[in-house]
């Protein structure tokens, strides 16, 4: 398992952006098949063979390049979670007695900021 960064060269050679082709959307070199189309097909559960049958201008290496691109993008975009500071029971008790009721839409960062403000 070489990791996504090991496949960097593979997808850079196969996926291009050109404003004159599909409005600059990433496509596979020598085709008008977009990266988005192949990734959506993979996400829908299509096999590599089915994708190649639907898009005869593609090669198996193109589909592999799409996967490598997605993996490299995820490595760059996904935040590394912070290790939360463990608070004493009394801090949590004060927080909930103050009337704060976390909702599903409240992020962990927002909750930590709220907790910090209740310690003052």
Image: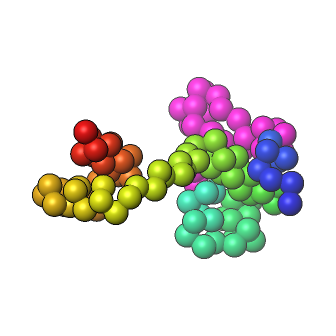
Front residue of this view, candidates 83 and 76: 83
Image spot of residue 114 (x, y percent): 27, 46
Q: Is residue 44 above or below residue 78?
A: below
- Asked if residue 70 shows in the view, the reply is yes
Q: Is residue 101 above or below residue 73?
A: below
Front residue of this view, candidates 108 and 2: 108
Q: Residue at x 58, y 31 (%)?
A: 24
Image spot of residue 3 (x, y percent): 80, 53
Q: Tell me the quadrant of the picture where the N terminus can be found.
A: bottom right
Q: Tell me the quadrant of the picture where the C terminus can be found.
A: top left
Q: Is residue 12 magenta?
A: yes
Q: Residue at x 61, y 33 (%)?
A: 21
Image spot of residue 37 (x, y percent): 58, 54
Image spot of residue 113 (x, y percent): 32, 42
The residue positioned farthest toward the top in the image shown: 19
Count of numbered badges drawn on the protein? 0
Left or right of 64 on screen, residue 92: left
Q: Residue at x 40, y 55 (%)?
A: 87
Residue range of the region highlighted in magenta in the rendering: 9-37
Front residue of this view, candidates 63 and 116: 116
The residue positioned farthest toward the left in the image shown: 99
- Asked if residue 103 shows in the view, the reply is no
Q: Residue at x 30, y 55 (%)?
A: 91
Front residue of this view, candidates 87 and 114: 87
Q: Within the image, what quadrant is residue 100 found in?
A: bottom left
Please name the colour scheme applied to the rendered image.
rainbow
């Amino acid at each position: 398992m070489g990791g996504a960064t090991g496949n960097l060269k593979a997808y850079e050679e196969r996926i291009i952006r050109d404003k004159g082709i599909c409005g600059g959307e990433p496509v596979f070199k020598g085709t008008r098949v977009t990266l988005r189309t192949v990734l959506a097909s993979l996400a829908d559960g299509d096999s590599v063979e089915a994708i190649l049958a639907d898009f005869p201008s593609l090669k198996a290496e193109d589909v592999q390049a799409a996967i490598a691109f997605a993996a490299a993008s995820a490595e760059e975009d996904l935040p590394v979670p912070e290790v939360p500071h463990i608070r004493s029971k009394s801090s949590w008790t004060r927080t909930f007695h103050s009337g704060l009721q976390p909702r599903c839409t409240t992020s962990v960062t927002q909750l930590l900021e709220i907790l910090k403000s209740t310690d003052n």
